Image: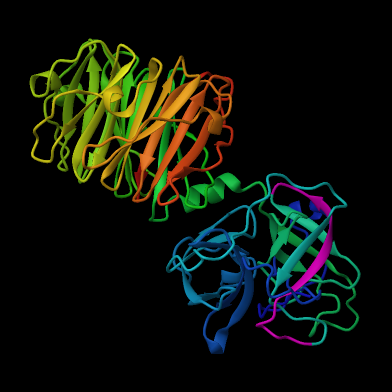
Amino acid sequence: MLASRLRPARTTGLLVSATAVAAGLISAAPATALTGTDAPATQLKSVVKLNIGDEANSRACTAALLDADWIITAASCFAATPGAQVPAGKPALKSVATLSDGTAVEVVDLAPRTDRDLVLGRLANSAGASLPWARIAPALPAAGTDLGTAGFGRTKTEWVPDKLHTGTFTLNASDTGTLTVTGKGTDVICKGDTGGPLFNGAGQLIGVNSRSWQGGCLGAPATETRTGAVSARADNLSQWTADVRSLTPGWKTEAVVQAGTSLYQGIRLADGSWTGFTDVQSKAGNVGGIRTATVAGINGDTHVVALGANGRIYHTIRKADGTWLNFGDVGAEAGVLPNVTQVSAVSTGTDIQVVAVSNGKVFHSLRRANGTWAPFGDVAAVSSPLSGVTSIATANTGGALQVVAVSGGKAYHTVRNTGGSWTVWGDVAGAAGATGPISSVAMAGSGSSAHVVIATDNGTRQYHAIRQDTGVWSPFRDLTAHLGNITVKSVGTAGFSHQVDVTFTTGDNRVVYTSWSNPARLFTTPVTVPTIAGIAATPLGSIALAPTL
């Protein structure tokens, strides 16, 4: 049986039906009760005990870890009065989460849903980094399915707030925001169990405990025998929870994907999940269509440099708080380049280095920290001649700008040193080995090394090489067997201290993700990024990645 020290639940008139819930016929008082078996010490490590308020005015609830920084629980745990709306921001009362490893950490920020009794709480530090995290279920089971739940609440005979209990419930009905369930046998949700996870047979999160009858719970009327309860749905909140969590400071992979004449932005979070993808022009202004784009990160800001359908280059910023600036015309400050076909960008400190391919030649500009742009300059004038360029990629290694350009199906490399001087273009094949004709290239810095990933032979083969800070290249490693039988349209990479994220857009209209890490020096098993809403039927084109904090 689960239990909590929330104010007593009002049980008069409780109807266990989705229709009644939707009509507001169920009391808004917290549901509180679980009287099942004790949870084994080695299981349910994602479940969290919550204490809200001081000793004189204290409440107890249950929650679950969503990642290192966030928990999910019932909003009613934090409400000033039963049924009151919980405001976003710092909790009104001091709130402490005790994790399964015994770590106690304060909840410093709340992100409530307004349509159901559910809230996300941000921890003061990433205390949950070493613990298992709850995963939100992709869909709701059918009515009649048995579900599990867990909580730190009362049982029938005692309240031991440090002991986790579990129970089994049958799913009766559902609507958009709520689930109604009934305890199996004598299992019931009690005070202290509010906010505890409701999960499916795979251990995935379906909802959080909200209200209950508490039949048989310690302290409940002896005449009360009903074991029904209401939970707030969580299975249909994957997108919302990801969006909230994406605003947490820390390493994330920003992605921009071009599809048709539109551009979409999404984020890969630390736990490997992805947010949805946002139409950039709906946020930063319509520039009449986008042909390709690149992305760079400075701290928590994401800089997007896009080539418009009109051939002009535009720039916008997605701020760390999720807001966007309007697109600005780069040519108005850096000069208009004719016949631009490709752009690539990377941050070096607080500057954004931008290279563009114009009439088959490489040009360079930078956006300074104060927002001004340097004029585009012909790289051939400061490096060596290179024409017929079809693809371009950039990376930052210790403040130096690394550039790889593809001409005649072959890769060439140059470096802009921190002092602003350029090396001559060098033939990558002479250092890393010959491949078939290159159709796409991406580059990322990881520490002092630059990683290059290419697609060749019309995208049917893929390779990876590393350029060390000494200038020595590793041989190109064939990734085709690892990635499987895919045809690559575009490659995107993002480098962290010891990791390189790699994505591909494919001929069968997928985004495929893998990553390389050191010291393992191996790639992870490739996975398909969840469907990008709204563009599934539009052929995907270019993709670009960048890390942000």
Q: Position of residue 83 (x, y in %)?
A: 64, 66
Q: Position of residue 180 (x, y in %)?
A: 80, 57
In the displayed structure, 338 sits above or below 346; it is: above
- Asked if the stretch drawn in magenta spans residue 46, the answer is no
- Asked if the stretch drawn in magenta spans residue 171, the answer is yes
Residue lying farthest to the bottom in this orientation: 56
In the displayed structure, 216 sits above or below 254; it is: below
Identify which residue is drawn at 40% across, 17% down: 439
Which sits in the foreground, 239 or 442?
A: 442
In the displayed structure, 57 sits above or below 319; it is: below
Left or right: residue 267 versus residue 116 is left
Identify which residue is drawn at 47% across, 44% down: 522
Specify the quadrant of the image occupied by residue 319. top left
Q: What colour scheme governs how the chains and residues are painted in the rendered image of this protein?
A: rainbow
Identify which residue is drawn at 73% across, 86% down: 159
Total count of labels = 0
Q: Does residue 514 show up?
A: yes
Q: Position of residue 213 (x, y in %)?
A: 81, 71
Which sits in the foreground, 152 or 287?
A: 152
Q: Position of residue 175 (x, y in %)?
A: 75, 48
Q: Which residues are magenta?
A: 158-176
Q: Does residue 14 show up?
A: no
In the displayed structure, 21 sits above or below 545; it is: below
Left or right: residue 462 versus residue 17 is left
| Quarter of the figure with the N terminus | bottom right
